[in-house]
Amino acid sequence: IEAITQLEAAALVYLCNPQRRIRELALELLKGLKFIDKRRKKSRTMDSYEAERLPENCTRVYDIIEESGSDIVNTILFQKKFKVEFPNLDRPEKVSIEKIATGDFNQLLWSICLGELVYLAKDLCPSVRSILWNLVIGRSNISQIEEDELHYNRDLWRNYAIVCCTTAPTALESGDSVRELLTMLSLQLKTDLHKESSILALERTNIDLVNELIPIMKPLEQDCYSKRLKRKPLERLKDICKIYSFISDKFSVNLLAKDEVLRQAFVNFISEAINVIFEVNDDPFLLYSFCKIVANVGEQQHFTSLEFIERNLKRRLFLMISFMISEDEQQAQQFAALLPPGFKKVAFKKIIGTDEISELLYEKASKAIASLFSTPFVDDKSIQRDDPVLKWVSSHLTHPTPSIRKIAITGLNRLLENLHDSPEMLEIALFNCYASEHAVSEGFFIAIVEMYKNNKEFASCPIATLFNLILFKLGDPNRLVRRSAIQLLQIVTSNRKVESGEEYWVNSY
């Protein structure tokens, strides 16, 4: 078993090689090791002591390639959609991870594939991970890149760096090796030659090491803020946003609730970076990465009672992001005018990009805004009918894209959950259930039903008002709305209410 594990780690090292023939042999080795392991498990001659030590569900690296290879390729295709153009990917249904490893593809494409493969292997094959780290850490030094074979060695070093960052143990286990690795990679962000390779590696930093990475990256961040309108610092901020957004995608549930240092570091980054991004507000790639960070941090709030992002910052983020993704200048200036005094009112710039990039950016920005509603958004638990938040909800409920409408309903659900004891909010929601625009009416009604599923309190709403609404919605042409009306009827009739000593609406129709 130990020999198979060591050979798997060695095969992953050979997969780092830029030469396709060597990668092909490494894949054959992994495939053979899986076959040998399978035969060992079935062998009747296996030593009983050895059989007891063998885990029941021992995952081999080639199992990951077979079972998750298509998911890895889909990840690459999404990155292709947004920022990377790769040749030979016009027919993705015929592309596999094995073909990318052994075919005539861009070396950068294989580096991304390798990073995704090793990321899965580090959790599913932990014994391979520790051996792999020891094999590659000595090969990741930037000084090993020789000028006479620059392209070959640069591709090789990039793959080693990606594997190192993905498999690195905690600083306590590895001593200074991890810190030196992260410092070396962060310094390469200032160079044009190795910047892209360093970004790919740092994006895949083991989540347990992010607290080590953030202090190392802090001087680069501060440089961006002090020279905010110069080209190079802005490019560097975009690189840092890309790294942090990729890391934030790996957040496990409640991670920020448990790790106060990591939580505060990401919130501080959001509060400082938004001002620079707002002043520039013309780079779709920078804004996309930033919105991804906000969405992932905001979602963490939904799973805990902690309020990570304080309310003034949430309001500012809402207004700034809404301004930057708005396609209408007049609407954008309305958002900018609501910013607190002291904030520079920047000129409206319509973000230029392909239609596909614009759609991806708009969706990610909408998710970021909806995530801000995970905790109370208004201090006094009251909200006015002309509040820009409600205008945002209504405009997104009528959006032609189904995914945007779904995000709007999610955001509205969270607003109602946090304001369920506010008579003003409930009155506004009920009013909008009768809106002339069917999408708005439908969205608010479904959100009200979801609220009552979680909070069966009707003190702020007369029962007769709810029954009138239910009867009205039972005649809706949308089957989902009619089903929601039945659900609300069941909730209301099963809830006991005592008023003036008399009991109403006992558990029967």
Image (cartoon, rainbow, N blue to C red):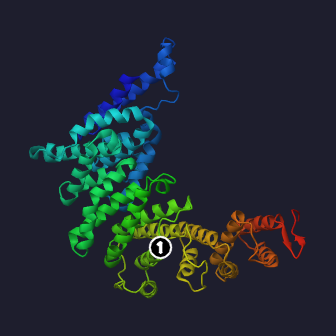
Q: Dot 1 lies on which element?
A: helix
Classify residue 111 as left or right of residue 152.
Answer: right
Badge 1: residue crowd in 10 Å (few <14, some 14–19, many ≥20): many
x and y percentages locating residue 495 in the rendered image: 81, 65
**Mark 1 — residue?**
314
The front one of 464 and 357 is 464
Name the quadrant containing residue 473.
bottom right
**Residue 269 against residue 323 in the figure, above or below:** above
- Residue furthest out toward the top: 45
| Residue 335 seen from this side | yes
**Residue 492 against residue 435 in the figure, above or below:** above
Quadrant (top left/top right/bottom left/bottom right) for the N terminus: top left
x and y percentages locating residue 227 in the rendered image: 22, 73
Q: Please name the residue shown 66% across and 70% down the image.
A: 447
The front one of 54 and 459 is 459
Classify residue 140 as left or right of residue 292.
Answer: left
Classify residue 198 as left or right of residue 248.
Answer: left
- Label 1 amino acid? Lys
Q: Please name the residue shown 51% across and 53% down the image.
A: 253
x and y percentages locating residue 387 in the rendered image: 56, 83
x and y percentages locating residue 347 in the rendered image: 34, 85
**Residue 10 against residue 455 in the figure, above or below:** above
